[in-house]
Structure formats: C-alpha cells, structure tokens
Amino acid sequence: MSGLCADVRRFRLLLRDVLTTGRTQLRHRDGLLLSVTDGTHTGWGEATPMPGWSPMSIDSVAVSLAAVSAAVSVIDDPADPRLDHVLDDLDRAPHARAALAGAIADLRARRVGSALSATLGPSPAARVRVNAMTSAENPDDVAAFCAAAVDSGFESVKIKVGLLDTASDLRRVAAARSAVGPDLELRIDANGSWDVETAIAVLGPMAELGVCFCEEPADGIASIAAVGSRSDIPVAVDESARCVDDIAEALGTGSIDVVIVKPQAIGGPDMAMRAVRLTTEFGATAVVTSMIDGAIGVAHALHVAAASGVNMAHGLATSSLLSADIGPAPEVSAGGITIGDEAGIGIVPYDTLPT
Ligand SMILES: [Mg+2]
C-alpha cells in the first residue's frame, strides 16, 4: 500500500433558470469533485463555493485541495488520526474542508459497509422530509407552485421574500396560504433584506398567515436576535452564522430558534453534526440544507439530515434546479428522500462531469 490517493476534478452545473438568492444572481454552480481512494474503496467529496456568499473562490479552493492531495498521499489508513490534522489545517477554507471531510467520511463508511448517516448519529432516519422552494414574484404563480407542491406530496414550502416591497410579499404568502389551506407548512427566507423595524412590521401579518419561521429577516446575528425577541414567529440564522462559533453566538442570544446548517458551507458532515448537536442542546431546531450543490454535496447533506434527529423538512430538494449534475442525485418523491442501505453516501459520480 502506497498511501491514499486523492484526485480533484472541476465541474460546472448550469441552472435551469436564473436564481436570485439574496444579492446574487446565479446562472451556474462551479465546483470541485474530490475522490480519496485506499486502493479498494473510494470516498467522494464536493466543494461548491457560492459567489457572493462564500468567503473563498473556486480557485482558492482548488489550491487548498491540491495541497490536501499531497498531504494524504503519505497516509495509508483512512482511520489514521493524522487526517484530522489535515482537516484542522482547512479550518479557514470551509468548502475545501467540506470536500475532504466528506470524502474521508464516505471512504470510512464504505470500508465498514455502513451508510454515512449511521456513522454520524445513533439512530439515523431512513427517510428525510424535504421542502419545496419558490421565488416566483407573482402571487398567482406562488399559489400555483404551492398547490403543485402539495399535489406532489410536499408538506413544506419555503417562499423567498425581501426582493419586492413588503406588501407584495404579504400578497404572495397570502395567495399561497389560500391556495393550499391551513395544513401546508410555509416558511419564508428574507436573506437579510429587511431592517429590524421592517421585519417586525411584516412578521406580525406573516404569523397570521401561519408562517412557521423566517430565515434571516435582517442582516447579522444581532439584528436577527433583535427581531426574534419581538417577533410573532420564530426566526432563523443562515448566512449570518457561518461557523460553529457563530452558531453558538446566535443561540446564546436566546432569541433565535432555528439554525440553518449547510454542510457544504460549514466544512463538511462532521462539522455540520457539531452544529446540529449544539443547536439541539440549546433547545433550538437545526434545519439541514444543500447550497444548490451537485449530487455528492446533496448526498452528504442528506445523510447529515438523516442523522440529525430533527423531524422537520430539510432543504435538500435542490437538484431539480440544475440542468445537469455530477451524479445521480438523491431522488425526491412524495416530499421526501428515502435513504437506501448502500454504503457511504450511496451514490458515485458519473465518469464524465459537466463542464
Ligand atoms: Mg436561507
């Protein structure tokens, strides 16, 4: 045996439609696929930083992963604790860390014939509920989207808000509610668009429409906590809490009830589970989401969601936004994803990646 062998390949995934999220317009997702093999088994990881969101570019992630490839080549055994030191060196490069931690976790799980989720938590779920998501501007389109989501079995829909004026957002959410009745869980995501007073003013009527929680009503932990302390509905941190320390700060305010955990952005499945456990210890709710990752990243997030012990809809129904993918994405049916009994993340990428 001559050491683990790592390989990095670049890909580009076009989105079916331009997606506006926060301040960014997305047309495609650029990423890197990492494989780590011990000669018998191969683990897969993905790094897909998001421009305008992530602190690092795809090129800087590529540099980090090239250094990783050299570091792992002198290690024979995937269980070798020196790999954890290699991960520690990537603490400031969360997407590169997500790729390596994901590949190592996948490799270790495949070697013991276990699903990744079973290596992350004590009693992983066999099926994870997921939410649909819309940013349609017209209230009729939002209503039609929600009705179609219910027809296909979704129990939760997230509506992006904050891009239009608040009266328009209220009309959009009201249209959704009247189209689907009281049972569908509606959640909203303002991506930090509002100031504190605007958020307080709009979340009162949103509560009357039965909105379950609001992600990032304002920008930054302090502002979100200020909203949460006065809001009629729970508030969530997402992009304002990018690492475990940020999440601890957010939970420490006592006014933030939901934490969005993105394994891709926080540094991989192990780091995401740390965030989930911390959130649960505070009595708050962790919702696991992809970052519109490729299939490998979505699969890692799926296994984190399964291991989380959180029976909420998680934000993993994102693969249908892509016109091509790097592998067979976990299949959404009837508003959920069932985890098979295959080892590791349960999928392998295609031989040829979209570029
Ligand atoms: Mg969000």
Image (cartoon, grey):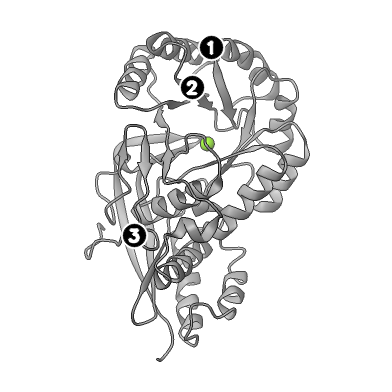
Amino acid at pointer 1: Leu
Q: Is residue 242 visible?
A: no
Q: Name the residue under label 3.
A: 342
Quarter of the image for the C terminus: give it: bottom left
Residue 327 drawn at (x, y percent): 28, 56
**Mark 3 residue type:** Glu
Q: Which residue is at the far front?
A: 123
- 276 left or right of 157? right
The residue where tag 1 is placed is 209
Q: Distance between the residues labelled 3 and 2?
A: 33 Å
At which x and y percent is residue 221?
70, 38
Among the 4 quarters of the image, the one containing residue 19: top left
Residue at numbered disc 2:
186
Label 3 or label 2, whichever lies nearer to me, is: 3
* Front label number (3 vs 1): 3
Residue 64 or 341: which is nearer the viewer? 341
Residue 122: image quadrant is bottom right
Q: Pointer 2 and pointer 1: residues touching (CB < 8 Å)? A: yes
Residue occupying image coordinates x 51% and y 12%: 170
Q: Measured along the vertical axis of the image, is residue 266 above or below residue 260?
A: below
Looking at the image, is mark 3 or mark 2 earlier in the sequence?
2
